[in-house]
Image (tube, helix red, strand yellow):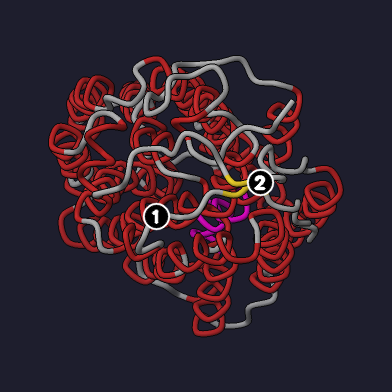
Amino acid sequence: MAPPSHDPGNAPGNVPGKVPGKERLDRGAKITVALLFSAWLIDYVDRLVINLALPSIGDEFDLSRTQQGVAVSVFFVAYALCQIPGGMLADRFGAKRVTCWALLIWSVFTALTGLAGSFAILLVVRFLFGVAEGIFPGASMKAVSERTTPGQRMSANGLVQSSNAVAAVVAPLVAAPLIAHFGWRSAFFSVAAVGVFVYAAVRLWLPEPQDAGVRSAAPAGGTRTIVRSGTMWAFAGMFFGYDIIVWGLNTWVPSYLSEERGLALTSAGALAVLPAGVATVAVIVGGRLADRFAGHQRKVVVPAMAVSSIALLLMATASGTAAFVAWMTVAIGAASLSYMPVFAVPLRSLPPALTGAAAGLITFGGQLGGVVAPTAMGLLADAAGFTAAFGFLVLGAVLAAVLSVFTPQDSLSFRRALRLPEPAPSPLPVAAESEQA
């Protein structure tokens, strides 16, 4: 059987130019999902550990909340800046190779975080850690695109990206006891070691792309078509709004529960299990909805962000810890439904030759949210308290909902907005190329 075309409109059994609905994952797609789920899991655990360690780091280095926010945001500056270059590197050198580079290098810098002897050194190490992790998302999403058909794509990506919410469960359960009993540095050493094992697994077992024996030419303009597109930047803005919520909560909820509610770090970590579990399910459901609707992101994003906005306001003004956690669970669960729909139309519509750059650009927008939210909320918490800081997150929900309405809702309108040609009827066969790490 001939391998499927690079072009999403020419998947076997589909009408050219029409993107199909949801399909079952085949064996290669399942292996890809399992390995990249593991890679994303350790990626997220690595970056979440610092949120749990912030109170201890702040005490050791005598940092204000604003400085603690900067320690988180400096990672996101580098992480955001490397999203588009990371996608371009994956398009140029191969998704598997770039994924493996990222895994190995960021594991080294995770370990070096545990060796930081001053606030200045910590900032430098976290910036370089952000560079290493920043080249990963575009490569990962490209790897999924190359190993799935368009009808499998968002369901597969939803399963992979659910690792982010799982990491929000795993990180406090693993890191909080380590920090409490052995100090904050031990947590970074431990997760770095796991990262090396995940690197080896991806390098050895990631399947070859489905289209290893065919190649379709990228549209005229190549990556410039993506980077110069106002439409693509609107999708990036949608993800920016989403990630303001996610990184605002991830950064400051542990400190809030510890400092304002008087909970021990281990107890605060345990309370994160419920909202993270709900978010895990929501990301998977959002991926399935994105495939079922063949895009049409406003059908999911608008109602999801409306619910999230209301829940965030109720969370910010909650008088009891139980109510705070309950409304946080609703807020993050509703917002997480929007995760994969943000990516759906671009990743279902573009040829794999451009998916690395496209995923990198959208993720870049999200990581700007990671730059803005921790520091802005730290400033608000210092100046006006945590109620104002958590209320700030509603702006992200509103932005995501508005942009979801004004972006293309399907592949046809998306291609027209980017002035891309309609899919060719057949690909050009070429010799298979190795993509070994």
Residue 321 seen in the current view: no
Q: Which residue is mark 1?
A: 219
Query: Which residues make up the magenta segment?
Result: 45-56
Tell me: 211 left or right of 150: right
Classify mark 1: residues with Cα within 10 Å, few (<14), some (14-19) or many (20+): some
Residue sitting nearer the eye, 197 or 221 = 221
C-alpha distance separating marks 2 and 1: 17 Å
Q: Secondary structure at mark 1?
A: loop
Residue bearing mark 2: 429
* Left or right for 303, reference 81: left
Image location (x, y in percent) of residue 358: 40, 52
Residue visible at 37% across and 42% down?
A: 246
- Front tag of 2 and 1: 2
The quadrant of the image that shows the C terminus is bottom right
Q: Is residue 261 visible?
A: yes
Q: Amino acid at mark 1?
A: Pro
Q: Main secondary structure of the magenta part?
A: helix
Is 376 positioned to the left or the right of 179 in the image?
A: left
Q: Amino acid at mark 2?
A: Pro
